[in-house]
Amino acid sequence: MADRKTRQRGLGRGLSALMSDVTEGGNSAEHAEPSQRRPDMMAPIERISPNPEQPRRSFEQEQLEDLAKSIREKGVIQPLIVRPRPGHEDEFEIVAGERRWRAAQIAQQHEVPVIVRDFDDTEVLEVAIIENIQRADLNPIEEAAGFSQLMNRFGHTQEKLADVLGKSRSHIANSVRLLHLPEEVQDFLRQGKLSAGHARALVTADDPASLARRVIKKGLSVRETEKMAKDGVGNVFTETGKSDAGAGKPSKDADTKALEGDLSANLGMKVAVDHKPEKESGQIRISYATLDELDTLCRLLSGQRE
């Protein structure tokens, strides 16, 4: 049984094998040229059910209508990835491609091309998250949540994700840090009122929500936001939260700030280094946003591995 599962997952390639299934099966390239990979079969659309654990809960009706129009003209170009539906003979559950399945129903298609995989529940969720990360219309918070799930829930490292997903390690690290922002600021990102660049500048502020509102109201650029977060109210690199200019208190040097950034990126959590000037002592503060992050931190500190 173990050998059978290994063969199905690409001779032990793990995440790379799952990623291959998503890209070869198609995810967002609905209008691209047909894949060289042939579907395993054509399945009646009424025998296919969505994945109840699908991380994506909302589908824009206008986009579905556009895709349905394309399907009426060309059919479903990219096959869905499905697995046998547990407990239901001759039925299938969607692993990747629910958007295509919904659009095919609007287009009144009777059957769709599918690639059948014998994935377990964990692999189904993993593939669904990978597929979502590949979406072109993903907002920064959705992308960050996908990265975080793959790391915290499945134990993948930033380096592995960067290699398999074709992203830089710094992109993934900076993306995950956005999840430490207050919910109000995350909503601004979801709504497109703030860019990821603006949000990254606010991560290190004491009161990012108030600064975010000022950024939106004044229409500040990313550079202006960075300066405001560094010099104005909410700067975590000072003890008072105000600029140190003329206050007689030195701000943290560039090396300390760089160290904080590196530690934050590696842990995926906010890290503050308080080093006492002219001494060799100090303290490090690590802030976690969820109990899952606390569990991850405890495992790291105790030397455990999942």
Image: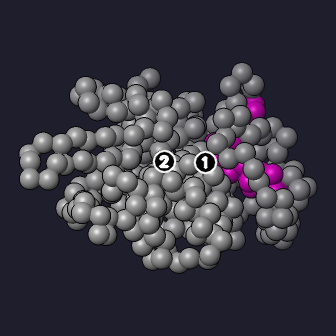
In this rendered view, identify the residue nearer to me: 180 or 45: 180
In this view of the protein, can residue 245 be seen by the observer?
Answer: yes
Q: Which mark is residue 28?
A: none
In this view of the protein, can residue 29 be seen by the observer?
Answer: no
Q: Which mark is residue 183?
A: 1
Q: In screen coordinates, is 92 left or right of 14?
A: right
Identify the element where label 2 is drawn.
helix
Name the residue furthest front. 247
Q: Quadrant of the N terminus?
A: top left
Q: Which residue is mark 2?
A: 180
Q: Quadrant of the C terminus?
A: top left
Q: Is residue 103 magenta?
A: yes
Q: Is residue 281 above or below residue 167?
A: above
How far across and down, in percent of the image, does residue 148 sit? Answer: 47, 45
| Residue type, numbered disc 2 | His
Q: Residue at x 8, y 48 (%)?
A: 279
Crowd band around label 1 with a 10 angstrom C-alpha radius: few (<14), some (14–19), many (20+): few
Q: Residue at x 26, y 30 (%)?
A: 301
Quadrant assignment, res 155: top left
Q: Residue at x 61, y 48 (%)?
A: 183
Q: Residue at x 53, y 32 (%)?
A: 122
Instruction: Report the magenta residues as a range.
Output: 90-104
- Distance Cα–Cα, label 1 vs label 2: 9 Å
Identify the element where label 1 is drawn.
helix
Q: Is residue 6 above or below residue 134?
A: above
Q: Is residue 185 magenta?
A: no
